[in-house]
Amino acid sequence: MLNFPPEILGEIFNHYVHGRLKTHQMNEDEAQTSVRRITAYTDSQTHPTDLTPVCRLWRATAISIPRLWATIYVFKPKSEGNLKMFELWLERSAGLNGSCPLDLTIKEAMAPLSITPARELKLLEQILPLAISQLQRWRYISLELSRRSEPFLKQLYNNTTPPPILRGVKISLQNWSRHELRQLMGVLCSAPGLQSITFGRKFCTRFYTELLLDIVPWDRPTTLSFTLLTESMFLRILSASMDTLQDISVSDLTILSNVAVGGSTAVPCTTMRRLQSIYIGGFSEGDAGTIFDKLTLPALRELRLPNGFGDHTEISLQARGWESLSGLLKRSNCKLQIFEFGDDESPGSRFTEEWITKYLKFSPGFEHLTSLRVTSEIGQNSDSLQLLEALSEVCGDVPRPRLLPVLETLILDSVRSVVDVRRMVSDRIAAYGANGRSKLRRVSADLVGEDFAVDMDLTSQSHV
């Protein structure tokens, strides 16, 4: 390795530090005791500081590559050593001309103020201004801060120049005042190239919703992510971003029928011309159909509903959700390619496989699917494997499967029979006969109640 050209050694170092194919994810208990409070990512097991003591060549090479140091995750700093390490990363990430883009995350301990050590607050008082001094380099900024950090950001508000290269923002603020929140979001949203905004767990409360509508330029970002939204807020944001938004994600969408944020006026139907991807982690407190009935999405390519249409006591609401979704796809005339659906909690979950199979069969909006993931149990009823059986059916007139003929990836999170999964795959392959080739490329299935899964890579005709 001592004979490698610096460019090759630099690429190896870059993969070492930033390669994200890691199996270990740091949990909260590990993170609390970890000595690595200045890292590249929350789960980092590899650090550029580990490269510098090896030899003079490695040290010189690592220090000369700003991108190794330009992704910084500050996790609940506790010592002066953390502060010194942060200063070191900032210095080495700047590059020769001091303009290397910086991706920065600062996460504060969210303990009650009465038990927060004065030392930790003192460290934040020094770390945040250091971060703000690099405002011109911010490409991505993530702040998870409590109200006690408000005074440490004053320097940011005095800046008259918008962050010139800022592209992404993630904000999770606990109990911040409206005035301070308005100032912070005003600075961040003034970035001319802002593309992505994420509102984290501590930030998304109804206290802030109307304030958000006034501050955020919804007609500029292409990607939005929320922890919690009400139905009316969701629809109003879509209406305000109909010409730009491409991707929206909501962990929990609260359906409060006939209630609009800021008044009682009903939100009009909206056509999203560029929206390609929707993720809704779960619906609550109402009818998911009230969302789908008000949208037209001609560019929709990806729809993920891992918890279905919500934890409802009325099975009729589950059925209405499917009807509304089918109507949305038909009205939009879109070519949906990726679909994820599941529902194991609601009283109607025993009908989930039946409904999925029915609408995949008879709704034209699903005919272009290339990827399907079902998180609910398949074969929940002892004599029912409706989805697998439907996927095995063959067209009578042409040599191809009847259901989802262009499907390439199938992921089943919970099945009772791996044998039936293998039989379905064999049937789909055989459906094309000698003159054709199956589109199916990958099938993955987890067996119910067992630490066992099947993962079939059909491009190489192998499986695990």
Image: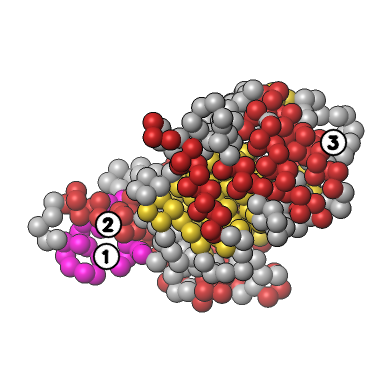
User: What residue type is disc 2 on?
Assistant: Phe
Q: Is residue 441 left or right of residue 242?
A: left
Q: Earlier in the sequence, mark 3 or mark 2?
A: 2
Image disc number at residue 51: 1
Q: Residue at x 70, y 56 (%)?
A: 383
Q: Is residue 286 left or right of residue 69?
A: right
Q: Give the image location of residue 300, x and y in percent.
A: 60, 30
58 drawn magenta: yes
Q: Nearer the viewer, residue 97 or 20?
A: 20
Q: Is residue 316 left or right of residue 462?
A: right
Q: Quadrant of the N terminus?
A: bottom left
Q: Is residue 23 above or below residue 100?
A: below
Count of numbered circles in the view: 3
Gap between marks 1 and 3 measured at Cα? 55 Å
Gap between marks 3 and 2 measured at Cα? 52 Å
User: What residue type is disc 3 on?
Assistant: Ala
Q: Is residue 25 left or right of residue 459?
A: right
163 drawn magenta: no
Q: Give the image location of residue 351, x and y in percent.
A: 76, 49
Marks 1/2 in contact by CB < 8 Å: the verdict is yes
Q: Residues within 10 Å of mark 1 (few under 14, many from 20)?
A: some
Q: Quadrant of residue 149?
A: bottom right
Q: Quadrant of residue 244?
A: top right
Gap between marks 1 and 2 measured at Cα? 8 Å
Q: Which residues are magenta?
A: 46-66
Q: Residue at x 30, y 43 (%)?
A: 97
Q: Earlier in the sequence, mark 1 or mark 2?
A: 2
Image disc number at residue 13: 2
Residue at label 3?
260
Q: Residue at x 57, y 69 (%)?
A: 450
